[in-house]
Amino acid sequence: MVLGLAIGTVAMLGNLGFLAGTFVTRRLGARIGIGPVICPASPIGAAGMLIMALAPSAGPIPVLVAGQVILGMGIALFNLQSLSLRQAITTPEPEPVWAVSSSSSAARPA
């Protein structure tokens, strides 16, 4: 197989894992919680990288695709859940001081 075609095939099929991770992360987070999803997500991604590193030199494409699928799943789970957590714990910005009282004679910014 031509090298460029092999790399494209691995990337294309491997990113199906990322897509699958985006579909399951919401339900998984709602079912077991954000923390229990985030904690194993990085090791899942690392396992995918390890699988790709251990691919045999003869016929590596199926192993590389499997590793890329697992890596993509781990990345999607971690990124989407950690972003949801950051948004949930961030407090809204307070109102500017000048907007608290309409009877204040203090100069307001233009």
Image (spheres, rainbow, N blue to C red):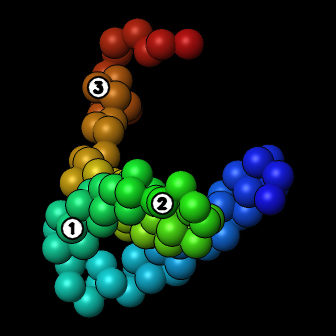
Q: Say above or below: 79 vs 92.
A: below
Marks 3 and 1 sit apart, C-alpha to C-alpha, by 44 Å
Please say whether residue 43 is visible from this viewpoint. Answer: yes
Three-letter amino acid code of the residue under disc 3: Val
Which of the two labelled residues, at mark 2 and mark 3, occupies the earlier sequence position?
A: 2
Q: Residue 12 occupies which quadrant of the picture?
A: bottom right
Query: Which tag, 3 or 1, sits closer to the chain's start?
Result: 1
Separation of disc 1 and disc 2 at Cα?
A: 26 Å
Residue drawn where x is 20% and y is 85% of the image:
32
Q: Secondary structure at mark 1?
A: helix
- Helix, strand or loop status at disc 2: loop
Q: If the image is split into quadrants, where does the C terminus sit?
A: top right
Compared with 31, 55 (above or below) is above
Q: Which residue is mark 3?
A: 97
Q: Which residue is labeled 2 in the image?
A: 56
Locate residue 20, reporting x and y percent.
Answer: 53, 78
Q: Is residue 2 positioned above or below 51 on the image?
A: above
Tell me the quarter of the image containing the N terminus: bottom right
In this figure, what is the number of numbered marks?
3
12 or 6: which is nearer to us? 6
Note whether 57 is above or below 102 in the view shown: below
Q: Where is residue 79 shown, x and y percent of the image?
A: 39, 56
Query: Do labels 3 and 1 touch, CB within 8 Å?
Result: no
Front disc: 3 or 1: 1
* Number of the label disc, if any, that sits on residue 40: 1
Q: Are marks 2 and 3 in contact (CB under 8 Å)?
A: no
Does 76 sit left or right of 30 as displayed?
right
